[in-house]
Every structure is written in structure tokens, then in C-alpha cells.
Amino acid sequence: MRADRLISILMLLQIHKKLTASELSKRLEVSVRTIYRDIDTLSGIGVPIVADKGINGGIKLIGDYKTSITGINKNELFSLFLPTGDKILEDLGKEKLKDSTILKILGDSSSDELKEFENLQNYIYVDMNTWNEPSTILNTDILSVLQNAIWNSNTLKILYRKKDAVKEVELNPLGLVCKRGTWYLVAINNEIIKTYKVTSIESALLTLNTFNRPDNFNLKSYWIDSTKSFKSLIPKFTFTFKINPKILNNIKERQFITISEILQKDDNTYLIIKFDSLWQGVEFAFGYGKSIEIIEPIEAISEIRKKAEEVLELY
């Protein structure tokens, strides 16, 4: 809706002071021409807004103009109250913050509206805990130190455990990421941005030294790019299996198993599945006994034969 877009422009300009028409068009997903039409509309209803041309130009509000209009519509309120996972707030020591924020936002709502938002909370739940018990318990005191260092741009000294070695590292912390209930610290180490698993940090000391956070650093973009790079470096092993059709549905329903292709040839059923390691594919096949046969890769056939011989010898 155009009214929502006009309010969004005002909110963005209040926050960022000045933005170009191109920046506004990207944020609001409309054309630059539409942005200029919206600016004319806002100016026409008395909003003190100007568009300066030139290299350092941009669109801005004149003086200390502020609007108290939030313009939050019903769908936007719904998006705010979708559960985000209590574990994240609990880890950060903010578990009570969400309830108080919701009360403040809904303070003027009717009883029917309150009931509707309560129902939304009751219909959707986000569980950030993994299925298995974590091998290492998160130290929330360390997480708190990391938060303080990030907010205040303080340098950190940490003891970091990597395999069997523990090393002292000095870092400039940039942000925290929670992925499936596991926390990661993103920080600069010797001018290189690296990622550290928080449960592998044995101690963290907040120093009095400060650093200048890179202006162009974006945590979300860094995380997306780094995870893509990490995944691309993991070797993939493509397995071809001949299976008993009776187990096909069971395989389809398994977590973390993605069938690349199902082939029918000479009344036989074949599956193509990729694994991150050779042993993962062998272990998968071993669990189905004679209902599954490895066709490729050749080295996996000798590996599963070796494992079968070890089991026979044991029993």
C-alpha cells in the first residue's frame, strides 16, 4: 500500500538522516521514479522533505522533524509476534524482555486483538534446541562478555580450544550468530575476519583497548558468504545404491538424507545420494543390511566389506 510506503520513507529518513532515491527504492522495492513521486506527495501534505542533487546529495528531512506515527498494520504486528525461539533470548539473558515489549506495543489494543495475537503465539512455536543433548554446555557468562565487547568495540583476549590444543587469541569482535542453537563469534584476528564456536572458548577477558569497527562490515552478508564458502570446500561423495523398493519411503522420510535422483532400470530401483564423507555413505548402507547394495563408489564397496568382516569376527 502507498500509505505504508510513505510512512516507511519517513521512518527510514528519521533513522538514517539522509538516503539517496536509489537506496530508498532498493529498500522499499519500487522504482526510483516512484520514490520521487512519493517525495512530492509528502512535500505536498506539509512534510519538510527535500531532495538535494549532486555527488553528496540525497533525500532528507529538514530540521528536527519527527513523526509519532508508527503506521504499523495488522500483518506487520503479526510478524513481530511470531515466536523467534526462547532459547536465543535465554542465552542472551533477555528472556523477560519479549513479554514486556509485547505488553507495551499492545497496550491500546482491544481484548479481541489481544486474543488474536495470543492465538498466533499458540499456533506457531520455534524450537531452537537440537534433538541431541549438546556435548558442551554453553557458558552464558562468556557469552555476556562477548556481547559487551561487541556493543562497546572492546578488544577481547580469549583462550580458544581447537582439537587438543588451547591457544590465547586477541580479537576485535564484530558479532554473534546463533545457528540451530549453537552460538558463533565473528571477529577480526590479525586483520582477517574469522569465526569461532562459542562453546570452544574456555575464557574471555574484556580489555580496555577499543577498535574501529569496519564501516562496510555486514554480519548477515558475511555469514551467508562464509557458510557458502565452507560448504563448497567440503568434499562430496556421490553414491549409487540398488535398493529394495520396500525401503524407499523410509529413506525419503529420513532427516539429513536428500535423494538426488531415483532411477528405474531393468525392474531395479537405484538411488543417487551425496554424502560429505565416504564413511557416511557406508554407514547409511550398512544400516539397511541386504535391502541395499552399494554400486558406486568402488572404494566404498571394499570399506563396507571390511566392516562386515569385523562384525562377523566380533560375533
Image: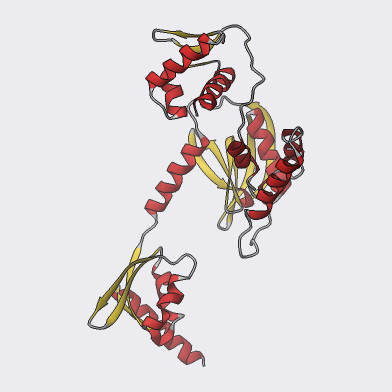
Residue 220 left/right relative to 127: left
| Residue at point 65%, 31% (across, down) | 151
| Residue at point 47%, 87% (across, down) | 311
Frontmost residue, 178 versus 140: 178
In the image, residue 55 above or below residue 225:
above
Frontmost residue, 68 versus 282: 68
State the colouring used for the structure image.
secondary structure
Query: Residue 49 at what x, y percent from top left?
Result: 53, 10
Q: Quadrant of residue 171?
A: top right
Residue 111 left/right relative to 123: right
| Residue at point 60%, 33% (across, down) | 73
Frontmost residue, 208 versus 56: 56
In the image, residue 145 above or below residue 61:
below
| Residue at point 30%, 76% (across, down) | 270
In the image, residue 285 above or below residue 58:
below
Query: Residue 278 at what x, y percent from top left?
Result: 38, 69
| Camera sees residue 51 | yes
| Camera sees residue 94 | no
Residue 122 left/right relative to 213: right
Query: Residue 91 at what x, y percent from top left?
Result: 70, 47
Query: Residue 154 at what x, y percent from top left?
Result: 65, 30
Counting every numbered tag in the picture gives: 0
Q: Quadrant of residue 262?
A: bottom left
